[in-house]
């Protein structure tokens, strides 16, 4: 009877949002090490948001509008880097015996993370904290702070010890 009930249970959905920072990889490893039972019993998503590239420097360096093929090459390169980052994360998960789905979106990371949480009905979002000081957070904003206040699920922010 218990087996039948467990089969009918739907897996919880957990998402770890990562970028190229060491802090986000630390958060992924921390989650796998410390929440292993929860993670392995859940559907795990590894998410990466690629910020929209700024081509302002290209306009200045090419004396006007940058060539379309240069922009395309830069966008393709950014996509390759994001896919490599997700593959590395998937490998870290596999080494912990956890299967993960990966996905990437292009846009403002804080918005794209919150949109993905809502679209996928995520029940726990895990993020790394890059440890910016108050002034940097005020000037640059904080993805984790934004997600804490706007994501439609509980948010766990993992801070790397200094």
Image (tube, rainbow, N blue to C red):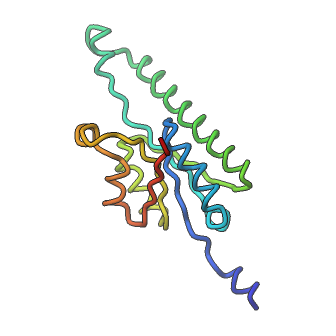
Q: Pick whichever, 158 or 87, lies toward us.
A: 158
What residue appears at the point 49 percent right and 49 percent down from the top-left corner? 17
- Residue 157 image position (x, y, % from top left): 44, 55
What residue appears at the point 72 percent right and 49 percent down from the top-left corner? 94
Q: Residue furthest bottom?
A: 1
Quarter placement of the N terminus: bottom right
Q: Pick whichever, 9 or 133, lies toward us.
A: 133
Q: Is residue 8 left or right of residue 126?
A: right
To which quarter of the image does residue 154 belong? bottom left
Name above or below for residue 94 compared with residue 51: below
Q: Residue furthest front?
A: 162
What residue appears at the point 62 percent right and 67 percent down from the top-left corner? 38
- Residue 22 image position (x, y, % from top left): 52, 37
Q: Is residue 51 left or right of residue 134?
A: right
Q: Is residue 65 left or right of residue 81?
A: left
To which quarter of the image does residue 58 belong? top left
- Residue 28 image position (x, y, % from top left): 57, 49
């Amino acid at each position: 009877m218990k087996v039948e009930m467990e089969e009918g249970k739907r897996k919880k959905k957990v998402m770890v949002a990562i970028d190229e920072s060491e802090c986000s990889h630390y958060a992924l490893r921390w989650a796998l090490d410390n929440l292993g039972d929860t993670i392995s019993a859940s559907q795990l998503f590894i998410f990466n948001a690629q910020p929209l590239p700024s081509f302002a420097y290209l306009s200045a360096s090419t004396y006007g509008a940058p060539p379309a093929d240069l922009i395309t090459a830069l966008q393709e390169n950014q996509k390759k880097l994001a896919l490599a980052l997700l593959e590395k994360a998937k490998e870290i998960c596999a080494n912990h015996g956890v299967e993960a789905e990966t996905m990437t979106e292009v846009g403002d990371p804080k918005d794209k993370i919150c949109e993905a949480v809502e679209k996928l009905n995520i029940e726990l979002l895990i993020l790394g904290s890059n440890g910016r000081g108050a002034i940097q957070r005020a000037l640059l904003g904080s993805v984790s702070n934004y997600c804490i206040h706007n994501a439609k699920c509980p948010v766990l922010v993992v801070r790397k010890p200094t």
